[in-house]
Amino acid sequence: MKAVVLTQKNAVEFSELPDPQTKNPEDVKVQLNAVSLCETDAKILDGSIPTKKHPIVIGHEGAGVVVDVGKDVKNTARGDKVLIDPNIYDTTCYACRDGFSNLCLSGGLMGREVDGVFQQFMIVPSRNVFLLPRNIPAEVAPLIQPFSTVVHGHRQVQINPGDVVVVLGLGVVGLMLAQLAKLRGAKVVGVDIVPAKLELARKLGIDVTLNSLEADPEPEVRSLTDGHGVDVAIEAAGVPDLIRKAMQMLRRKGTLLQFGISPKEVTYNMYDAYMKELVIQATRSSLPQDFEDAIRIVSQGKIDLNYQISKVFKFEEAKEAINFFHDRAKALKVIIKT
Amino acid sequence: MKAVVLTQKNAVEFSELPDPQTKNPEDVKVQLNAVSLCETDAKILDGSIPTKKHPIVIGHEGAGVVVDVGKDVKNTARGDKVLIDPNIYDTTCYACRDGFSNLCLSGGLMGREVDGVFQQFMIVPSRNVFLLPRNIPAEVAPLIQPFSTVVHGHRQVQINPGDVVVVLGLGVVGLMLAQLAKLRGAKVVGVDIVPAKLELARKLGIDVTLNSLEADPEPEVRSLTDGHGVDVAIEAAGVPDLIRKAMQMLRRKGTLLQFGISPKEVTYNMYDAYMKELVIQATRSSLPQDFEDAIRIVSQGKIDLNYQISKVFKFEEAKEAINFFHDRAKALKVIIKT
Amino acid sequence: MKAVVLTQKNAVEFSELPDPQTKNPEDVKVQLNAVSLCETDAKILDGSIPTKKHPIVIGHEGAGVVVDVGKDVKNTARGDKVLIDPNIYDTTCYACRDGFSNLCLSGGLMGREVDGVFQQFMIVPSRNVFLLPRNIPAEVAPLIQPFSTVVHGHRQVQINPGDVVVVLGLGVVGLMLAQLAKLRGAKVVGVDIVPAKLELARKLGIDVTLNSLEADPEPEVRSLTDGHGVDVAIEAAGVPDLIRKAMQMLRRKGTLLQFGISPKEVTYNMYDAYMKELVIQATRSSLPQDFEDAIRIVSQGKIDLNYQISKVFKFEEAKEAINFFHDRAKALKVIIKT
Amino acid sequence: MKAVVLTQKNAVEFSELPDPQTKNPEDVKVQLNAVSLCETDAKILDGSIPTKKHPIVIGHEGAGVVVDVGKDVKNTARGDKVLIDPNIYDTTCYACRDGFSNLCLSGGLMGREVDGVFQQFMIVPSRNVFLLPRNIPAEVAPLIQPFSTVVHGHRQVQINPGDVVVVLGLGVVGLMLAQLAKLRGAKVVGVDIVPAKLELARKLGIDVTLNSLEADPEPEVRSLTDGHGVDVAIEAAGVPDLIRKAMQMLRRKGTLLQFGISPKEVTYNMYDAYMKELVIQATRSSLPQDFEDAIRIVSQGKIDLNYQISKVFKFEEAKEAINFFHDRAKALKVIIKT
């Protein structure tokens, strides 16, 4: 069986691994059909996010077909098309028990702590496998994993129809956040500095797009809301200064969703938070229920993920795919058919 | 009619004012029985919080007896003992309409934007008057106003019995926050640097008290929670560094309540908030429903506010009361019987 | 000034009334532009819902232009287009103070407890007046009042994108409930027994429509949801047996919204509610925040209310309009331009 | 190894079973220390609740010591004192994935679907084992299982300090529901028809106790709440008529918790629910987070469960214990030390 492994930073190779077999009663064997790469993978490849071992099979976005199941598996059977949840969790720590397996104390990610999805076959616990309806194309399926984190972020905040939501940062994930806000009935304002992203946002139906290089977006956002400010502001770029900016854009009793990930320090003014009685809400990864909802939303045709697919490669071309992905000017996402 | 007015900063005088009369159909005339002073009043007196006019009748904590009502008043009648809600709000801005009159766009405070409670009689709209059950002593009644802000802060956060809650800062308000956490079934840890406050906290039944001058409280807080961290951390001192400290003390999916007021900048790490999927929740002032709950809690004997009363003065002694209150080493709160 | 009054049941007359003047500082004088009739009005007209007095100006759905304001009015000024909130509430009972003015202990409705909107001018407190954006046509404005009750009903239940929601009963209000569910990202199933209503539902974009006279809708609803049942079921017909039916259609942890109004008895099985850990949630009227949201949604063009307008009459034709409305086969709603 | 098995209805025997061994990597072997019986067990014993197999080891309330663990077990180790969660769930159905393993589609109960806790040793998945702090006595530990269902019920409803809560039915579980309401800061009214239960409620600190045989409790409940009605009413007897009664006792926007289990039909009036905008909330079993909270509450000494222990038996006396328990006049709960 072939797999794409990272032997050390910046060194990706094809490797021949033994065909894995189910062992535990809740094991599922999946033949991968399509996998994709994201920003986190790029950081794992260049070593800025360390892996737990070397060599490691890369990738955490993948979907395939079930080819074998352990005797206690109830949620799937041979022949099912499935999406893989790459989150490792133990089900028994306090976070898992409180319903937050995304925060598991001994949690991890496929492709970082354990072998990932860039292989022809893999064994996963049945709880990491989600049934895919037939109407979801193979090359779209892996994209549902990052979309599940968007669903999770949205779950943290209340949005009512008619609300105005601003999304700061319109990358692959920002565009999904904006689309989902619209799907929840909000009027959505997207802010970025790259004209092509703003153009794409408009194509995806985002109501208002603002280039923050051209003008401070805050006055415009305020005028769109009778001077009150937005109901929800989503920071989707991982830039601390945008947190501060987002707080200024919020109306009284507004909510700030910290979606972007950064190791940096944020500074905000206590009095500003007090005056508007604001909430700053962080979000991390996704839960099984987010996968369920994400699959339903995609299957119902309520969200467009196709715009993300810059190019589809064959499994043999995985290295070319990685190079193509590295050149971010060209690529939003690449899909590799396994 | 006599009133205590601030003519300019640091200048308090007794003044003779005309006896006010009800005019609008929803007006209520109250004869004040007891008033008290808080930290905000101290800042108004010394000018660090500016008032909207001079001279101004000071004070926003007060209770009394209804002596006259306009024809449309439904919630009270002559002879009723009432607490005064000092919050001015218009009922028609978007914040009021969304249920957040505490954030009213044209909101204000008695004793700061309009005349306050340090007078023998005053006219207030009926919505600023709350019925007091007979079993609440006159000198305790004014203290229910600051307690209502504590109830409001608690309303922002979920606390389940068995939760561990840490309160950072055990001043008059911190002690109420801690007591209310205990009343909600939590195990409560109180942190301060003043031995007398920690001693008082113990007397009031706070489970664990820690002097943060003696040792960093975080390891102790962690060990009290099986190493996980607390469910809820309440910053009650208005010190930015305590926000950071509170975030470290929180368990995954924990909530930080920013209760303390400060014009200062807070710095936190985005990654820390992300890893634990934290919430930072601000709180401001109180709502009518908080007054209702605060009165019920006090009337049911579920909270001890008496510890706050350092000394009771007569109305004629208002200036001595203010001086006594300024000397904070001696006084938590002073009550002035009008 | 002309007004349409009900002198006794089934007796509607034009009446000449004195031009009303603002008196209290928070009064607003509105010149009505358009009013409409609903099911409740029909019952008031035929006496099955009693009014508090006779004669009474009828109607509770109306919009107009502000022509005068009292000195303390902050939310509107002469010349503003406004919607009227017909709910009377005192702001000082426990329900109002808890944020539920829709449940006010001394609450009432214009056109039932006090004079209504079928007059050329009227005085209302400023809190009963909501600013209308310019892009909302005069004849649509009155329909926002019933829509606000739909917004209120939806506020009681959580709906996530991808959820499946069933609406039982597709009258004027049922169709708004269904549209709003769709606007929140749900897949919506509409059930009725009248082919024309089902046809209209399809035109309005409802995903699945089922005629419950042709077949029991439950198996079909179940098959649409992988056999699990729907996330939310909304009873919108006021038929007790549909409550029972709705409970059967729900998935585990599902929510039943009791929107339809009926004086009848509902029977449900305790064990069924237990097994699925269901919630039955009632809803009543609407709150100021519902008006705000309803106006925003209509102004953003996110909902179609025009389908409701069967015919537009002149104010002089009010009696013809009422007759036309009584003949429900022809009319969903009638608009009367005043 | 000895076990107490039900061979057919009303036929309990001691049986010699093979000492069980861990097999799966997440298995835990527990040596039982103490077990207890509840109402459900009584119904299983007399056949009114059928079991999935015969013979079956009875019992679902039990605690013990870990004597062996599989290689992937993270939450416990040899020598730990543990409580057993008797709920079987698959972690992969939609209910489990949505965070409601208590509603698992293939769920079951130890002692009913699979062998229970009345044996000297048993194998359970690690997710069914909860660590017990040292300060919880062995004979109290099994009682935490039913208490976890009380915690779960309470989790469904919001209770604020100062609220008034009525509990209808003061059996073993009703008394825990009442105590927990008090622990959350509520004023609690308990209603029953058995003087001894009302006496016990008073001893446990319930604020007001009413014998509904002596007088209709509704007027008294209403007068305790200024005529408004209670914030939360909990039906804890499984009597449909009490649901109706509870609805009458509720204030506007109140919540009814349907805790009692019954196969019977409830009848309520749609208009009553509408007028007060009520919620009827069912509850079922408990979740892992409820076990965590229940253990914390007991360990913090915040609830008294000892009153339940009528008598402690040795394991050899299990049959006498069952007979003693059957004679409910004498026994609330019996503990069997294994």
Image: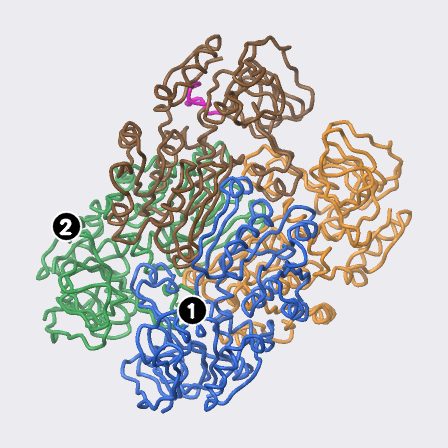
Chain colours: A orange, B green, C blue, D brown
Q: Which residue is mark 2?
A: B311
Kindly identify the residue that appears in the image at 37 percent across and 29 percent down. D301
Give the labeled residue for mark 1: C288
Say whether residue A112 is left or right of residue B225.
Answer: right
Helix, strand or loop at label 1? It is helix
* Residue pictured at 33% horizontal, 57% vertical: B289
> Label 1 near label 2: C-beta < 8 Å?
no
What chain does mark 1 sit on? C
Of tags 2 and 1, which is closer to the observer?
Answer: 1
**Majority secondary structure of magenta residues:** loop
Is label 2 on the same chain as label 1?
no
Q: Quarter holding the N terminus of chain C?
A: bottom left
* As drawn, B182 above or below A36: above
Q: Nearer the viewer, residue A111 or D32?
A: D32
> Is residue B299 inside the magenta stretch?
no
What's the distance in space between the residues labelled 2 and 1, CA to CA? Answer: 44 Å
Q: Secondary structure at mark 2?
A: strand
Which range of residues does the magenta coloring cover?
Answer: D132-142
Image position of D101 (left or right of B214): right
Residue C146 in the image, given as x and y percentages of width and height: 49, 71
Q: Amino acid at mark 2?
A: Lys
Q: Amino acid at mark 1?
A: Pro
Q: Position of residue C52 (x, y in %)?
A: 31, 72
- Please state which of residues A73 and A19 is positioned toward the viewer in this rendering: A73
